Amino acid sequence: MHIPDGFLSPQTYLPAYAMAAGAWAWAARGLRERLDETTVPRLAMLTALAYGLGLVMVPVPGGTSGHMLGVALLAMIFGMRLAFLSYSLALLLQALLLGAGGITALPINALAMGLVGAAAAVATKTLLLRVNETAAISIAAWISVVLPGLVVALVLGIQPLIAHQPDGTPLFFPFGLEITLPAVLIPHLAIGVGEAVLTVLIWRYAKSRKWCA
Amino acid sequence: MSPRAWLVAYLLAVVAATFVHEPALLTAALAVAVAAAGRGRWKLLRRTLIAILAFNLTVSLGYAAVALWRGDFNPGYLLLVNLRVLLLVFLGMWFAARVDPIAAISGVSPSLTFVATLTLGQLRAFERIANDFTLAFASRNPAPPRLIDRTHHAAAQGIALMDKTMAAATESALAMRSRGAFDD
Amino acid sequence: MIELSDVSFGWPDGPAVLSRLSLKISPGEKVVLLGANGCGKSTLLKLMNGLVFPASGEVRWNGEALTQAQLKQREFARRFRGDCVLLFQHPEAMLFNPTVREEIAYTLKKLGRADVEDKVAHWAGELRIVHLLDKAPFSLSGGEKQKVALAALLALDPQLLLLDEPGASLDPATVGWLVDTLVHSDRTVVASTHSLSLAAELGSRCVVLGTGGEVMFDGPMRMALTGMALLEKAGLAHHHRHRHGGAEHAHLHGHDW
């Protein structure tokens, strides 16, 4: 979710950075064990892929569509750690290089989409794979969009609570949970369907090329 | 100032700005930033405004509507938050335009620098692909496409990206090996 | 048929690619856009196909202004997209249907044309891709993809065929077929290339684009290909030392990169 800088309080993003740093260290350590000469180029290419998938417009009935997330696809094909690291790195490059901003939202987005999204996708797929593959992939992709949406809605919605003037006027994002939860979740429920459809179609291709772990 | 120093300065400025809640101070900081940005300042400012317009307008109007209805509307909030966002996004755009991010993060970790460099090349190619896909779709659609067509098109774009990614990863690993990157 | 007057264009946040370019193409002409990589040939073709619009200047299609507003009009868009088509340099950007058959039929169906199956079969036959009709486009090789895209475009029987670097992915046999089919037809063709030998075969009129996006030459092909100074300035020819027979020397010559 593209939240411009200035809507999240330091009480939010500073601890989030600390948490994210811990998560990045965990993911990197896990990778080092399986490190071989292809890891670095792979991470680089997956970062570009994470960015590239974000350029794909998810078709939703009615014309307006969101951007694809792609984290479910990345996680299910390449694993959670690579998906998390590459997604985080893509966010970093977007913030520092492409002027898209979001350096304060970065740890939230990385944790919500890159970590929670990836984990939810992999867990769902593992659970449902024996039932039906298409259903497993689509539900995994849907969850990988909706659950991060929930996290972001929560983080935004508590801003008025944790940072406000003595008289109650908000200092950062002004809407409470009663607004952010429906406002963020409902569109994500729809976009998640589009993401699920695209993920299944691309997954089938990846399978036919034998790229799936 | 070295790129790394600029990165640190940028990050400190961002953090500092989120601790300031005086519109006057934020306005002054914005004026200083715009002045210091040099010749491209108006272009940067324009880009900033375009980038934040939709989101900020929605939030501002939403806040006004909800707060007026609740009876606790404070126009000072609108001034504060919009100024802060303007300042922070401007700083971000300025940083991105002026500083080489690779140089800035070098020294944090050589692997990170390496990855970022490799990524950037591929990233530009993917932007070109996205642009081509969009234009080609427009070229082949004499009437607005149906949902199923847009779906096929989006999937085809994702597939093209995956194809290129897998090919590129193999290529660059081979290139790195031939240049001795893995011999130690 | 299509006319550009004083057209300037730059991609967003980028430098100007074309500046004050004027070009007029009449029905039946076979025009080659010759220029080094990056000189703006692709961009020029995209302008002609109404995919991007000039920052200044005008593009006219059969006398009507080709603008974003105009293309939003259903009737005009139908006519234009059926009559003016562009083969992209990277064909995978054009393909998205589940099978080659549906791919070739796509725009035909959208235009409500008759005899779709016959047309698909005919052009698949012409391009020798009948055996691929039930395959998925993304499983094909680069050359096969370009043939599929070409079939999809030719099936529309367009008045103006724009080709962006057609020699890039096509195998020599298909290039030969292309030259035979197109160059001796009534269709108006504008093809871009940086290859001097391909240029010679693709058309009789040559427009040389300089590295700054300006028209350096517009005239008979023969004159363009023998004007060494012009070619060097356009980045299409160079000096280097080489051997002829036993002697080593240096002179200006062109290469087919």
Image: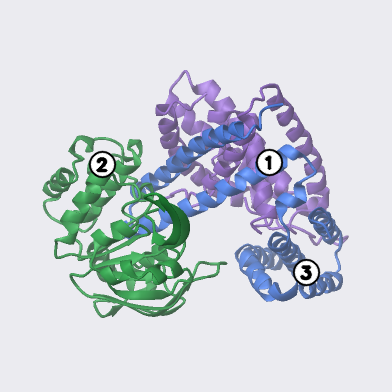
Question: What amino acid does circle 3 point to?
Answer: Asn
Q: Residue B42's spot in the image, x, y percent?
A: 68, 76
**Image mark for residue A73:** none
The chain ID associated with circle 2 is C
Give the CA distance from mark 1 to mark 2.
Answer: 40 Å
Residue A158: % across, % down: 75, 49
Give chain A's shade: purple
Point 50% across, 35% down: residue: B166
Q: Which residue is mark 3?
A: B74
Secondary-structure class at tag 1: helix
Q: Estimate the x, y position of residue A178 in percent, counting from the top left.
A: 67, 50
Chain C pictured colour: green
Q: Which residue is mark 1?
A: B114
Query: Does B92 sit left or right of A75 as displayed?
Result: right
* Label 1 in the same subunit as label 2: no
Between C80 and C220, the one lying in front of the other is C220
Q: Colour of chain B?
A: blue
Q: Secondary structure at mark 3?
A: loop
Q: Chain of mark 3?
A: B
Q: What's under tag 2, amino acid-wise?
A: Val
Q: How is the image coloured?
A: by chain
Q: Amino acid at mark 1?
A: Phe
Relative placement, left or right, of A144 versus B38 is left
Q: Is residue C74 visible?
A: yes
* Pair 2/3: label in front: 2
Callout 3–callout 1 Cβ contact below 8 Å = no
Q: Residue C100 shows which numbered tag? A: 2
